[in-house]
Image (spheres, rainbow, N blue to C red):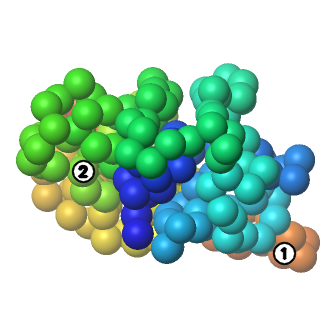
Amino acid sequence: MTLPYIRRTYNVPAFRGQTVRWDGKLGRILSARGPHLHVQLDPGPKVILHPTDGVEYLGRELEPMAVPRQSELQVGQPVEAKVPSHLADVYDLPPEAFGLPRGTRRRAVPGSSHVERTHNYLRRYGTVTQREAAFHYGDWRLADSVYRLRRTVGVLKETVEVPTRYGHVARIARYSLELQGGAH
């Protein structure tokens, strides 16, 4: 069972990358398995939740989205949840979310591969790290996406030092798009 199944069955706006609140903690939906959501709490562990078990779906401004309760649902009821506009150019969403007719090929949807999502993210936010790629659009292999993206556009790599939770220093890669003329 997938996120579209969960959206149809439970009538909730469950999308990959969607911000949710559960037990007073914020998190993002990573994926679905069976009738359950896999959510990464921030800060905190990854948890497995039922879509209607105290999960509050939040929009861009972290305001609760209108979600009917389990007792209000009817079998076969269509999903009326709107896609938050800030997700449209980064996340992998169904064609209907973009106003395209049902059955449109997935390649017509912006960001239908990790390479395209990485490119969209870099154009929108300027830089990306592995943690941001995994947390914001589910790309756990950012280096591979950047390698493939470099076939079409210039991507710069900057090594930066960041503190770890243990007080040590770690070096990570931060990628950005190369500006025209080779300037950064």
Q: Which mark is residue 117?
A: none
Residue 168 - label: 1
Q: Is residue 23 left or right of residue 134?
A: right
Give the residue at x 13% y 31%. Answer: 101
Q: Earlier in the sequence, mark 1 or mark 2?
A: 2
Q: Amino acid at mark 1?
A: His
Foreground tag (1 vs 2): 2
Could you say whether the residue bearing mark 1 is in a helix, strand or loop? loop
Q: Quadrant of the C terminus?
A: top left
Residue sitting at x 31%, y 58%: 114
| 16 and 117: which is toward the camera | 16
Q: Considering only vertical position in the picture, is 59 above or below 105?
A: above
Whole-percent x and y of residue 37? Answer: 59, 63
Asked if one can make out residue 2 in the rendered structure from this viewpoint, the answer is: yes
Residue assigned mark 2: 112
Q: What is the crowding at mark 1: few (fewer than 14 residues within 10 Å), some, or many (at least 20)? A: few
Q: Where is residue 45 drawn, in percent x and y?
A: 77, 70
Q: Residue at x 63, y 27 (%)?
A: 66
Mark 2 is surrounded, within 10 Å at the Cα level, by few (under 14), some (14 to 19) or many (20 or more) other residues, namely some
Quadrant the N terminus occupies: bottom left
Of 104 and 11, nearer the camera is 11
For residue 179, say whether it is visible.
Answer: no
Residue in the picture at 89% in, 47% down: 24
Q: CA distance from mark 1 to mark 2?
A: 37 Å
Across and down, in percent, residue 177 comes to 34, 42
Q: Is residue 100 above or below residue 172?
A: above
Location of residue 40 with respect to 7 vertically, above or below:
below
